[in-house]
Amino acid sequence: MNYRELVAEIKRKKSFLCVGLDTDLEKIPSSVLSRSDDPVLEFNKQIIETTLPHAVAYKLNFAFYEARGPQGLVSMERTMQFLNNRAFTIADAKRGDIGNTAAMYARSVFDYYKFNAITLSPYMGVDTVEPFLKYKNHWSIVLALTSNPGADDFETLETGEGKVYERVIKKFATSQMSEQVMFVAGATRPETFATIRKHAPDHFLLVPGVGAQGGNLEEVCRFGMNNSVGLLINSSRQIIYASSGNDFAAKAGEQAQIIQKQMQQVMQDKGII
Amino acid sequence: MNYRELVAEIKRKKSFLCVGLDTDLEKIPSSVLSRSDDPVLEFNKQIIETTLPHAVAYKLNFAFYEARGPQGLVSMERTMQFLNNRAFTIADAKRGDIGNTAAMYARSVFDYYKFNAITLSPYMGVDTVEPFLKYKNHWSIVLALTSNPGADDFETLETGEGKVYERVIKKFATSQMSEQVMFVAGATRPETFATIRKHAPDHFLLVPGVGAQGGNLEEVCRFGMNNSVGLLINSSRQIIYASSGNDFAAKAGEQAQIIQKQMQQVMQDKGII
């Protein structure tokens, strides 16, 4: 899915919501656990069915699948097959390695599992991202300023020409890359979005941290939205664990719709739709 | 395996060699491909058999296994079962994510696959490493200064109080952490080992880049070795692809022995053994 198609999909659904499938076997309702031989897949299917009308993207957090060994990856593969290109898909894997190793990760995420995008850690430099950019119409989502307390350990260190995360954005925010590169920008620091937009006016930002981590949707939009929206806002726990009972899927759908309505209002106020 | 046990094993084998199992299906000899239903496992088994007398550690590069989907992880799991604690094992996964996600990665690598250590990207800060430190006698190997050209993009940026990679080392090189934290330091920049040792005199360093990438063993040892050796030097392609023929395992063993003999000489010269 390219830039133009992603923007069109956002306008069609009046939503820039990304649902995070951080699916934890220990939090799946017992009714699902007892009825399915792949309860993670079954949980994901039901969540996708009720949230798909309100969301444009799904982000699968690889750690939650890898924790169960190869079988967890089977659940992930089947979830991707179930989604079957009905939404923009993000491999939240935060990979970051050099040349031939990065090429192998790209093969895994883009060729094997068929994701549209992958999150990447920039620590080792530009050559950790380049192998992913060879896949046209696929996206590299580079960590910039994250929403966790540890973001201040290294990301915000001053380098003389901007903080480390600004140097990261400047390195990857060339115009030719706006079609294939996004940045991760945490919702818990909305005041930094102005700085991020200064360096990357056109790029999409993937924004975690709204909801459970305390980020505020309106503030993120005020400082972070551009004329093509330019935001994918992720919500994981707030949606997929909206209820721990048998109504989990229905409640997830309701929660996704509440957020979608807020997003629609913001897009209307901004004159985008 | 704790610090004391690792040092004892290095002295017993007179080796601080780590063999990198970056096993690529496309580079496996046709005789192995045609004889086994899990050629990656079969290749690894034969490499391990011939190199185990000369190596103290094995590093599995996750990308090469993940590229084949869940089946690749089955090959990894079986390789770990075959190794069965006969050496120090490193999950070269370069993970780096927050709190509950990091805990899931730790569960995957330490609980499920039973690795002794994992490589981690420090970009997001200290809270990306803490969940791994809760596993006693397990190791977090934090990226510091890597051996690729892109290392100069962010790792070597000046921050006013040292370069970014020095800030990383200082943050994690507390004395209490020397029992559970190592650093990745690339062999292609031996002159930087003096700086690294200034900040982390006691910590183990995992050193890639000797051999195929051009790093020099003697130089790395001259600047990087401490009184407990304090080095694990990795070689991947130089060993496992020493021959592309049916003698690949024998040649890998010979190559590992050549490096082990060099290491033994260095340890003797230094009076460690």
Image (tube, coloured by chain):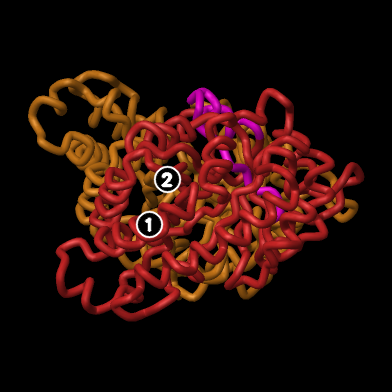
Chain colours: A orange, B red
Dividing the picture into quarters, in which one does residue B150 lie?
A: bottom right
Q: Does the magenta segment cover residue A190?
A: no
Q: Is residue A174 above or below residue A248?
A: below
- Seen at 41% across and 72% down, the residue is B251
Q: What is the x, y in percent for residue A248?
A: 25, 26
Q: Which residue is mark 1?
A: A88
Chain bearing tag 1 is A
B6 left or right of A162 in image: left
Q: Is residue A250 above or below residue B63?
A: above
Question: Disc 1 residue type?
Answer: Phe
Q: What is the x, y in percent for residue B178?
A: 67, 31
A17 left or right of A194 in image: left
Q: Are marks 2 and 1 on the same chain?
A: yes
Q: What is the x, y in percent for residue A123?
A: 65, 53
What separation in Å lies between label 2 and label 1 (alpha carbons)? 9 Å
- Seen at 28% across and 24% down, the residue is A26
Q: What is the x, y in percent for residue B43?
A: 29, 64
Which is more toward the observer, B50 or A164?
A: B50
